[in-house]
Image (tube, helix red, strand yellow):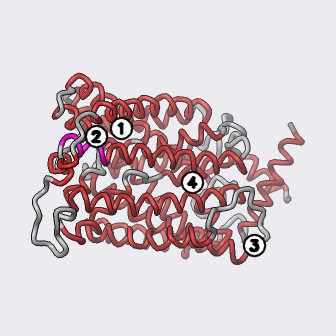
Amino acid sequence: MSTDNQEYLAKRQLKRGTAGWILLAGLGVSYVISGDFAGWNFGIAEAGWGGFAIAAVLMAVMYLTLVLSLAEMSAAIPAAGGGYSFARQAMGPTGGFITGLAVLIEYALAPAAIVIFIGSAVESLLGFNGPWVYAAFYLVFVGIHLAGVGEALKVMMVISGLAVFAIVATGIALFMHFDASNLFDIAVTDAAGASDMLPLGWYGVWAALPFAMWLFLAVEGVPLAAEEAKDPGKDVPKGIIGAMVFLLFTALMVVVLVPGAAGAKLMGESAVPLVDALNATGNGSLATLVNVLGLAGLVASFFSIIYGYSRLVFALSRAGYLPKSLSLTTSRKVPARALIVPGIFGFLASLSGEGDLMLAMAVVGATVSYALMALSHILLRVKQPELVRPYKTPGGVVTSGIALVLSLIALTGVYAFDPRAFFYTVVLFLIGGAYYFGYSRKHLVAKTADEEFAMLAEAESDLVVAS
């Protein structure tokens, strides 16, 4: 390795060996947990309970098959870029950039949406809201991340634990009030295919897909922590699969028990479905506690997705796709600029106050990235069968093929729900593409993914010897 490359990478090192598989599973749950508290239930308003249940099952299958595919690739290619790194290995620099840009759109806009929801939660609890509330949350939680990854992940586990407690306690309280007839209390419309099971017809199922994604959105970010894992080949697959299994459990609990106890119609219109369901069933004291802990759920997802976008920006910057200064790390081996700069853009986006629009745009970025990551798994199996794979996806390319097809269907669901979000996100892709083809494509640090990984491995080896 040249001296220049060695110095370049020495300034861009993350803290190795920080996270075991339990912390990684906690990170995966933390990414998603706010989606169990609110957002998913609006899918009931689009499709009725039966239609939303179909959408939720389809999205659960999509995420499970995607997670199993990512588990294989993250063990074989343990890089901080996650899906971007896999796509670059499979499809070259351009495929890597488009995938990375799609994930970046998701991870930059999702915190903006969540902080708007946090503002609403703060207002309901304390009576005040506004841009300075958004700014305060960005400052505090970006600041915690700047203290170091170990400290940040421990804080994240505590916050996530409080949110999980609220969900489980709600499920236990509502179990005794469950009545299957409550699931079908929405009047049947004259939509095509409408029935008691599908009161808003098959179009409703299509439009409900983005809301069903909210039960699992961002769990795919676990591989972004690969370079900070103790044993990436084992810890990342166990972490992401463990998180997905737990999220399937919480999704089943809220989708069935909450409307089953309080009624699908009421839940489809509720801003805080768990709280309203508890109040409707006479559990007022627990409802107050869950209302407070619901804020913890929002904060957990906000906090962990900040971690995710920082590691993605770090990886894209280190490779030269984004300005290289963004990947500089501090003495604590924290990518400070990759935390701060996207946080500023996210805060500015939050000033729109349109959380639903930000969320829908994040879903567009997510579904594009899912399709490309699933395709990457297929291409790597075909083009690089010799690649060492400590973990292999059950079902192989059939599994990732299912994820690919369902990702494309989910992408069209965003258009069915909100065409604005679809077209605004296309504009972001065009801006990103112009930057890549006009500048960064000619300034990449390495020509291929293999070359970049070899440089990183050599730099790590040199640093170990030097220490």
Q: Nearer the viewer, mark 1 or mark 3?
A: 3
Q: Is residue 326 shown to the viewer in this render?
A: no
Q: Residue flagged by tag 4: what amino acid is it?
A: Leu
The circle on residue 312 is: 4
Tell me the CA gap for discs 2 and 4: 26 Å
The circle on residue 135 is: 1
Residue shown at 48%/64% (left/top)? 102
Residue of label 2: 131
10 Å crowding of disc 2: few (<14), some (14-19), many (20+) = some
Instruction: Find the magenta span and give its range.
Output: 256-262
Q: Nearer the viewer, mark 4 or mark 1?
A: 4
10 Å crowding of disc 4: few (<14), some (14-19), many (20+) = many
Reading the chain from its start, which is encountered first: label 2 or label 4? 2
Q: Quadrant of residue 120?
A: top left
Residue shown at 80%/56% (left/top)? 4
The C terminus, quarter of image:
top right
Is residue 245 in the magenta section?
Answer: no
Q: Residue flagged by tag 1: what amino acid is it?
A: Ala
Residue of label 3: 385
Tell me the CA gap for discs 1 and 3: 48 Å
Q: Quadrant of residue 320?
A: bottom right
Q: Nearer the viewer, mark 2 or mark 3?
A: 3
Q: Residue flagged by tag 3: what amino acid is it?
A: Pro
Residue 291 against residue 362 in the figure, above or below: above
Q: Main secondary structure of the magenta part?
A: helix
10 Å crowding of disc 3: few (<14), some (14-19), many (20+) = few
